[in-house]
Image (spheres, rainbow, N blue to C red):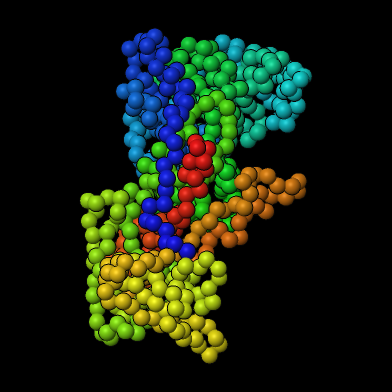
Amino acid sequence: MAAMTTSETESPEVRTPSNFLRDLIAEDVRTKKYGDAQIQTRFPPEPNGYLHIGHAKAICLDFGLADEFVGKTNLRFDDTNPEKEEQEYVDSIQKDVRWLGFEWERLCYASDYFVQLYEWALQLIKAGKAYVDDLTAEEIRQYRGTLTEPGKDSPYRNRSVEENLDLFVRMKNGEFPDGSCVLRAKIDMASPNLNMRDPVMYRILHATHHRTGDEWCIYPMYDYAHGQSDSIENITHSMCTLEFADHQPLYRWYIEQLGIFPSQQIEFDRLNLTYTLLSKRKLLQLVQEGHVRGWDDPRMPTLSGIRRRGFTPEAIRAFVASVGVTRTNGIVDIEMLEHFQRDDLNRRARRVLAVLRPLKLVIDNYPEGQEEFVEVANNPEDPSAGTRQVPFSRELYIEQDDFREVPPPKYFRLSPGKEVRLRNAYFVTAQRVVKDERGNLVEVHCTYDPASRGGNSPDGRKVKSTMHWVSAAHAISAEIRLYEKLFTKTDPGDFEEGESFLVNLNPNSLEILTEARLEPSLANAQPGEHFQFERVGYFCPDPDSKPGELVFNRTLPLKDTWAKIEKKAGA
């Protein structure tokens, strides 16, 4: 088999992706919809989990479009659910946003606005637009009706303003237990939009908040807090995914009733990937049940996970830009993301020699005790990266798969009597093998052609395979973690009734190799660096590495299926 080149990717045809959000903002700027006010966006995650690749699209849109129109972006935590929110998630989200290459104008929290939101709730009660309801959560669901049948009024809907004010203040003061009553907006129980059928604004929850402690025992619902938080911050374009489209009338209703800054909500398609689950609840389950090694497990679709695996923010931003923005949800092949990552690493990653499953190769006619160095390019795609000297000696390690005692048809690598090229070094010909008492292959002995130094024969003879190697005397050991897709199905959420999404977990998503041998230049490799192990794939050091105990994660193999798909589609 011919050796892979160090540049396996082929760039797909360049297409201009659609982005209706950019067009909408441009029109708002042209017509001065907000006068001379600056474009203001926000990225508003709930701190109840780690960000994932789906959030990357929202981050790139919120920050990228604001930058494009010389605007600003706030990072705001919608922290209205104290039972699920933690400071750990707040910290990780800030780290992920910065890692993607963005910086916020203001760091905000919905909890910053709890007093204002409470006062606005009082204002709605006084205007006859909100009431305290004693129905249970189940009764509220029953009263709400269905998509085809209108809801019916709560028996508490017509309480007087005075009674509602008294009850709501007592709710705030902690006089009632959890679930005993709620504050609801008074809108229209016959509305065809279920979100407008007297939605809950506040619920009682005696839980300690990660920022406000026990100051509050009533907490605003997301639909009530979100639009008003946008308005407080003068958000001009509140971009969110399509599942919130049916909530937009409620978003506008609160703002109109309160007469506050008219932020506008705009919905766009979610980023969905094949072989990937992006449900925070399911990701949390994977972590809590030990199916992965934490939120930053390199098999996870979290930004911390793919960062640990070796993905780069540049590749993610390029990928997000390529998929465009529409008003229709779809699913993107994960190989498209992998293509952009390979393309980025192909330009930046230093080429190195590493043998993952070593087999000793002894060059019988190479002088014993002699050592030399061969010059190797650090990155053929970047001449400015320079070269380095790699040690070569009589005993080497090659990949086990690069030798076959009985070669199959069309096998061009090393076998008895076959000549191959050792990359940047010499031509060698296999002569004999050494096995242990159980018949296992231990060593391959060969001879070399001293005249072929540099990997070229002076007589012009050709070989069909080039193999990588490391010098046995100089090699360093490392643990290698080979990651595959976490799920076996294109749609991991597809499973039979009575089963769990866990049935689609890939039992072979991680393989750990403990006998790998690497060239000595990698001895001081650090997390955050990127390497191409020649003929093998892209790798990066894992944070588990210690001095003398290196651990490398495989980011991706060299093969780029997406580039080939795109090339064929454009042919």
Q: Please say whether residue 532 is visible from this viewpoint.
A: yes
Q: Quadrant of residue 184?
A: top right
Q: Residue at x 27, y 63 (%)?
A: 376
Q: Residue at x 36, y 81 (%)?
A: 447
- Residue placed most toward the observer, 274 or 12: 12
Residue 415 in the image: state x and y as whole percent: 47, 75
Q: Is residue 241 left or right of residue 59?
A: right
Residue 285 in the image: state x and y as whole percent: 59, 50
Q: Residue at x 61, y 60 (%)?
A: 507
Q: Quadrant of residue 420?
A: bottom left
Q: Residue at x 34, y 15 (%)?
A: 37
Q: Is residue 529 left or right of residue 372?
A: right
- Residue placed most toward the observer, 68 or 384: 384
Q: Quadrant of residue 526?
A: bottom left
Residue 88 in the image: state x and y as whole percent: 44, 47
Q: How many marks?
A: 0
- Residue placed most toward the observer, 78 or 368: 368
* Image position of 177 with respect to 466: above or below: above
Q: Residue furthest bottom?
A: 437
Q: Please say whether residue 119 is visible from this viewpoint.
A: no
Residue 86 in the image: state x and y as whole percent: 48, 44
* Image position of 435 with respect to 107: above or below: below
